[in-house]
């Protein structure tokens, strides 16, 4: 059963729906998402800095189900590297803007 990532616009909308900044759960402290294809990094505000968490979006070609996973495969390596660099840079920018950088 091959998993196919959904298109980027669908992933962005789904991710914003799942964890939006206006979420009724304030403990998430979600800020934004950076994405490269199916690989995304959700950026969050911690007590003293911003941090990120990685996920991989997937969509079943047989059942039309979709979701997110914390499992990654060798074929995801290039996108993971790009997303990690983008997320780290963005966290640093957000920390500086909030006066949290050292």
Image: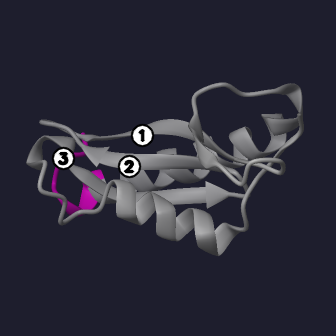
Earlier residue among tags 1 and 2 = 2
Query: SS at mark 1?
Result: strand
Left or right for 28, reference 91: left
Residue toward you, 3 or 28: 3
Residue at x 54%, y 37% (from the top left corner): 54
Residue 14 lies, with reference to residue 69, above or below; the image says below
Name the residue carrying label 3: 100
Q: Residues within 10 Å of mark 2 (few under 14, many from 20)?
A: many
Numbered range of the magenta stretch:
95-102
The CA span between labels 1 and 2 is 4 Å
Query: SS at mark 2?
Result: strand
Name the residue carrying label 2: 43
Q: Is residue 70 magenta?
A: no
Name the residue carrying label 1: 52
Left or right for 28, reference 43: left
Name the residue at the front extreme: 63
Q: Are marks 1 and 2 in contact (CB under 8 Å)?
A: yes
Coordinates of residue 27 in the picture (x, y in percent): 12, 41
């Amino acid at each position: 059963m091959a998993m196919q990532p959904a298109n980027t616009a669908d992933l962005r909308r789904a991710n914003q729906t799942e964890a939006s900044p206006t979420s009724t759960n304030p403990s998430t402290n979600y800020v934004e998402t950076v994405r490269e294809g199916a690989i995304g990094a959700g950026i969050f505000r911690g007590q003293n800095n911003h941090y990120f968490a990685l996920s991989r979006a997937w969509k079943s070609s047989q059942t039309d189900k979709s979701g997110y996973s914390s499992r990654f495969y060798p074929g995801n390596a290039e996108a993971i590297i790009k997303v990690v660099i983008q997320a780290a840079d963005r966290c640093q920018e957000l920390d500086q803007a909030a006066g949290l950088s050292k």
